[in-house]
Each structure stands twice: as structure tokens, then as C-alpha cells.
Image (spheres, helix red, strand yellow):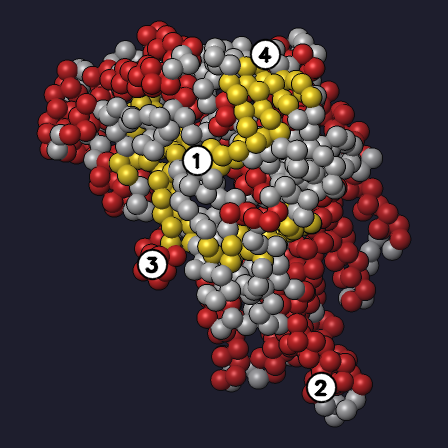
Amino acid sequence: MARYVLARLFSAIPTLFLVVLLSFMLVHAAPGGPFDEERVLTDAVRQNIERYYKLDEPLPTQFVSYLGGVLQGDFGPSYRYRDYTVSELIAGRFPVSMQIGALAILIGIAVGVGIGTVAALRQDTLLDRVVMGVAMTGISVPVFVFAPILVLAFAVKLHWLPAGWSGAHGVSRMLLPVLSLALPQIAYIARLTRASMIDVLKSGYIRTARAQGLGTYAIIRYHALKPAMLPVVSYLGPAIAGVLTGSVVVEQIFGIPGLGSTFVTGALNRDYTLVLGVVIFYAALIIALNLLVDVLYGVIDPRVRLR
Amino acid sequence: MRLRHFVLACVFGALLAACGTDAQLDGNTLHRGLATDPESLDPQKARSVQAAHVLRDIREGLLGLSPDGELVAAAAESWEVSGDGLVYTFRIRDDARWSNGEALTAEHFVAGLQRLVDPAVAGFYAQTIEDIVNARAIIAGDAPVDALGATAVDANTLEITLERPVPYLLSLLTHPSTFPAYTGDFADGAGAADSASNGAYRLASWAPGSLLRLERNVNYWNDDATAIDNVYYHVLVQDVTQLNRYRSGELHITDNVPPEHFKQVREEYGEQLRVAPYLGTYYYGFNLTRPPFKGNKALRQALSMAIDRDMLVNRITGRGERPAYSWVPPGTNNYDPPELGFSELSQDVRNDVARRLYEEAGYGPDRPLSIELRYNTSATEQRFALAVQAMWADTLGVETTLVAEEFQVLLENIRERAVTEVFRGSWIGDYNDAQTFLGLMQSDSTSNMTGYSNPEYDSLLNRAAAQTDLERRRLYLEEAERLMLADHAMIPLYFYVSKHLVHPSVRGWQDNVLDYHYSQHLSLDAAQ
């Protein structure tokens, strides 16, 4: 196991290097630069700004010095937010995205697995149909429709919760965004759980367990749940990465200072260093999460051996 | 109750307790929406309009603007201008102080101006003061920073010397890039919150991307006149989010109003919706350096006349914009914009003339003009471009291809002038003077998007620049604009309006063409 993890970590190095190289080239190839505005700078002023950011050096030199910085954990200064370095921006924004994303995933797993299991046990009953119908709606309704409806209901009409992030307190400002993010997760996980649970419940060892007189709760808890979780676990890798790195839509709707919206504005502003920094950070995060999921797989399913 | 249930109940109770309307408007805190996070609160490094809004609250220049947009004394109590218009002497208030109690002196203003042109600081607005003696040379790295024509004669006297008269210098000095710099300001690692402030407010905290909290600066010379103790700027990029927060009672003032909700907002909020003329022009520009528009004035005029501007502002933009027949917007100080010759004609007559000009230019049903129209990707721009495309097709038979591009891509294409034919552009005045618009069309202006180059126009502007007599200067400028409009270098389409929702409890709000609203001029009426 340890050897497996080490090998995977080593193989991540060339992947990350490629990510850095490719995104560096792509970002610089994109038309338009970080200092383009309708008010065009005079040549002298532009040169000063480019010298300030060392953009006057040839690209390969820029890449080498950038890579050197990255190896030391320095993602350089942001071209847009002049009071901040990219590392500071990521360090400030990621925890916000993570907080909301982690909560949404936890709720997604708890509620999704719960109702998925219930639906599987009551297969083809009215309850099953209703739950799965709601889940289907949850998957189909995009978050940019669902979130504004929540805002309209709970903030604008009822005044129970704030409509945005800034100036509001802890939990109250998190409820609506977390709910918006969690809903599609609940729906998806519920459907995955139901399908795989139905399969598992049909297998021989469950029939044996029933024949031995075990109650439904015990069967689910001790025998069915673990194997039924396998598809959910493999879904969780990308899902966690997606949710942790921030939902651009939810962050923009609620005005949340998370990493997702920062990434998008960074790209639109041609904030080269910010975009690169976030891409590298995302890449590392996704690699780590995929590894984690594979390891978890080995823990849950004895048939999987990690070498 | 089992322990687990007890814990669950506690968590749930805490969740409920934490809910509630804690972000509601109260006592003496003003909540304002801000459309982007300021990229910097260093006056000389800041770039966006939004950063400037905040800086006007926490710092003060030599001059400021009154609630209705008139120039007023601020940190300087008085000033004198030499007869040739080249030397400005400012008398700084004795009681002007930084938020830490230190005296504000002429040295601080010199330091601010020097920082602005210092190549090592690399300020975005350096070029706005390049008419100060030696500024150009310093920006280019050919002269030391202290050669700048701004000197502290004594602690309270500042002298600014110009290379040529700049009649709008006083307006420039209300721009945050010319604000004073505190000694040791923004040195290595020091953030905006560590810095001293000389405005009516000081920055108490800044949660990037989220919230800027401003507190009353008790050391401000005019603190007695400040009514509101705290100002919260909420960074909300989406104008719909600002609207929602306004509707749920969390904002006093929004930065904008989303176009798609405009009608509904107007019905719902009536007087709370403030729409006012704004110093900005929306236009379609021609690339004058390439065919088909190079040297083809008749064609340019035909395209300009075939656009029904009334229809565009009523049906497409629909937020109270006014159709534009000039480049400089009305409401500009000491200026009376001339209009395009056809502005008095009805649209039918314009269309007839346009058809004739179109044929004169060598086009017709058998040989239709085929052009590309470039604009930045957005639903509003798309609808606007579609309408223009239809007008050109119906009236003239022009085949227009619409090309939507990301904003930065569009800007680069316009600047390179290699592929653009017709493009969407806009210009917002930096200060209230016709120069900010007309200077753009000078052949050596870096922001000259169309590539317009007319020696007569250039010389009229240069003559205007050398004038100290404001009336004669105005005539030169108006003559220049008349010439440029007659050349149909671009198609002015509409003049912008500023749009805000302002809560009834906010007092002292006045519409003005620059759309600057200092928090220190506002107060809150608790009764509302």
C-alpha cells in the first residue's frame, strides 16, 4: 500500500509539470493582455508596468523563473490585485470554497445515501417513485435556477436569511449556498446508491443473511452498505474536487469570495499568474483526491489490491 | 435522551440561533454595493472605477467634488493660477491631518505625484499628469523622480508647474491617482489597512472579494460634517446579487441595476431608482485604416444615418439612455456639443439620404456591402448588434456578419486594426472636460481606436490646449468635434446613464454626470 501511494505520488510530478507548461503557454497565447483597457496606455507607461512584472523578458526566461518560484511555493504577484500575491489570494479564497463545498458534500452523502437506501428497500412502491422523481428533478434543475429561487423565498420574501455573504454571520450566510450546492449531490448520490443497493440486495449472501433471520437494519448496516458504496466512492473523487474548488455559479450568485469565481475573473482579466496558480492548485488537488479515492476503494473492497 | 440525540439537538439549535436578520440595515452604517473588488487601495496603483470610489472616501485630494459634481476645495483651502496658466500654487489647510494625527503637508502631495510617475511604482494613470514639468521624462526613465515640477514651497504650500496649460488640471486633481502619499506608505508587505488615511473615513478591515469596512476618521479636518459613522462596501460582482440584497434590505445603495430586471425594478421601486445622465458615450467605430471604410466617407455616413437611434434606446437598451448625435456628451463642463448634421431629420428622410450615399459609395442591390461587426460577448451587446444588423439590411441591404469576442480579445483586435471593420466601443470621461473625449481622436493618442487622423483636427486641439481663455478654448474644441463628426469617423449611438437603487433612508444623494457619490455627503434618516 505505502509503495503504491509513493509510486502514484511520483507519477504525479511529470503530470503536474505538464500542467504548468501547458497552461503557461495557453495563458500567454490567449489574445489580449492583462493591461488592455479601452484607455490604452502610452508606450512608456506600458513598458514600466511590464518591467515591474518582468513581462519584458523572453517567454522561456519567464517560464524558468516562474517554475523556480512555484517549486518554492511562490506563485508570483497577481497582475490585477496589486496588493496581493497569488499565494495570498489562494490561501484567502480556498478555505471559503472548502468550507461550503465540504458541508455540501457531507450533506449530499448523508442524505443521498439515506434516501437512496430507503428507495431501494421500497423498490417500485409509490415512495420509491416519489423520491426518485424528486432526485431526477434535483439533477435536472440547474443551480442557477435553484439558487435564485432559494434567495427569493428565504431572503427577499421571508427575510430569514441574508441574500449574500459579506457582512452576514457564520451559519446564516452559509445555509443557502450550501443547500444550493448540496441538492444536486443529494440527488445524484441517491440515484447511485439506489441502483447499487438494489443489485447488492439481490446477491446470494444477503439472501443467506435474511435466511439466518437478520433484521433489515442489520443487513443494510453490516452487509449491504459497504459494497453498495463502491460506485458512490468512485463518484466522490471528481465530485469533491468539483465542489471543493468552488462552484463559480453559486459563488457569484451569493457574492462569496471563493476560489471558483476568482479563477474565472482571473481568466477574463488575463491575470496570468493568478490563473496559473489556481490551475496548478486545482491539478494537485484533483490528483490527490483521485489517489485518496483509489486508496479508499482498496479499504472498502477486499477484492481490490493496490500494488 | 441519549447523548447522540442531545448533541444533534444542540447542533440544530445552534443552527437556528445563528439564523436571522443580522445583516439588516440599521442605525449608523451605510451599506453600499461595489461591482468589483478594488485591485489595490494604493492611490497610485489603483486602476478600477470601484477602487476610486473607495479611495474617495478614505483619502482626499487637493480638490474634491460637491454632491452635484462641482469642483470644491478639499485638502487645499485655496489656490492661485499664474497668468500664463502654467503655475498652480495651492494652500493646504493648517488643520489637515492623517488618521494617525500627523499633519498633512505639501510634501505628502509631492510624494504622491512623484510616486505616480515613478517607473518603479508603475502607476496605471501616470500618463494623466504627463503635462507636469519633466513628467514624460521621468516616466520614460530619463530623469530622476525628484525632477518633477511639483514642489513643496513650505509645509502648507504646494507648487505645480506645467509644460503647457492644462485648463482641466483642477479636475484631474480630484482623481485618486493624484492623492497624497503617506511617508512609508505601502512599503514592502504593508497592506492597505496598515496605511494612514486623510479622508473622511479610514479603512478598518478588508476581506478581499467580500467586504471593506470603513470607519469615521476622527482626525479628518471636516469630521464635524460627517454624518455616517461606518461605511460597508459589499463586493458583489453580479448586479443581480446586488439587487437581491437591496430587496432583502441588506444594501442602501446599489452600484448598478441589472438590465434584464430594469422594467420590473422601475415599477417596484419608483423613486428609489435613480437614473441620471452619465459622462459616457456608446459608439460603433470604423477601422479607418483599411477598406472598405478607409477614405470612404459617404459609406460611413450612410451606415451612421441608417441606424434608428431612438428605436435602439427605446426598445433595446431601454434604461433611459439618450440617443447620441455627438461624441462629447451633453452636460460636459463649459462645452456645447455640436451635433451630426442629420440629427434634425426624420428617420425616413435619413434612410433616403443613406441609400443615396450608399450608392454614391459604389454599393447597391447587385453589389452589397459585406462587413463584420465585432462586439464583446454579452446578451445585451448581442441584441444591440442584431438590431443594427437588421437596420442596415432593411435600409441598405448590407450583409453584416456578427462576431462576438471576449472583451480582452476585442480590445486587442481593435488596437491592432488588422481584422476589425466595425467594432463596438465606449468611452467614459475621466474628468468633466471635453478634452477627455476629444483627445482620444487625436492622431497620436494611444487610445485612438479608429485610427482617425486629420491634421486639421489635431491642430485645432493643440490650439485649444494653448488657450488660457476658456471661451476661446471652448470654440476651438467645438470646431474640432464638428470637423470629426462631419468626417463620420465613428457612429455615436447613445449616451450612458448612471443607474442606482437608493434607499429612502439615504439623505444627501444627488445625481451627477461623473456618478461620484462621496459617503461623507450622505446621511441616514432612521425614521425611514
Mark 4 or 1: in front is 1
In the picture of the structure, the residue carrying the numbered disc 4 is B133
Q: In the rendered view, tell whether residue A186 sits above or below residue A291.
A: below
Disc 4 residue crowd, few under 14, some 14–19, many 20+, Cα 10 Å: some
The amino acid on which the numbered mark 4 sits, given as a three-letter code, is: Val
Badges 4 and 1, same chain: yes
Marker disc for residue B384:
none
Q: Are marks 1 and 2 on the same chain?
A: no
From the image, tell me which residue sits under label 1: B70
Identify the chain of the residue marked 3, using the numbered disc in the image. B
Dot 2 alpha-carbon crowd within 10 angstroms: few under 14, some 14 to 19, many 20 or more? few
* Residue mark closest to the camera, 2 vs 3: 3
Residue B424 seen by the camera: no
To which residue does mark 2 refer?
A217
* Closer to viewer: mark 2 or mark 4: 4
SS for tag 3? helix
Distance of mark 4 from mark 3, alpha carbons?
A: 51 Å
Q: Earlier in the sequence, mark 3 or mark 1?
A: 1
Q: Nearer the viewer, mark 3 or mark 1?
A: 1
Foreground of the two, B34 or A260: B34
Asked whether, in this view, residue B393 is left or right of residue A117, the answer is: left
Q: Tell me what residue is drawn at x 66 percent, y 47 percent.
A: B217
Give the mark, 4 or 1, whose residue is nearer the N terminus. 1
For the point 28% across and 39% down, which residue is it? B322
- Return the x and y of residue B202 as percentages of the image width and height: 66, 45
Residue B270, numbered label: 3
The kind of residue on which mark 1 rests is Glu
Q: Secondary structure at mark 4?
A: loop
In the foreground, B85 or B500: B85
Instruction: Check the residue under mark 1 and report the chain it is in.
Output: B
Q: Nearer the viewer, residue B77 or A192?
A: B77
Q: Are marks 4 and 1 in contact (CB under 8 Å)?
A: no
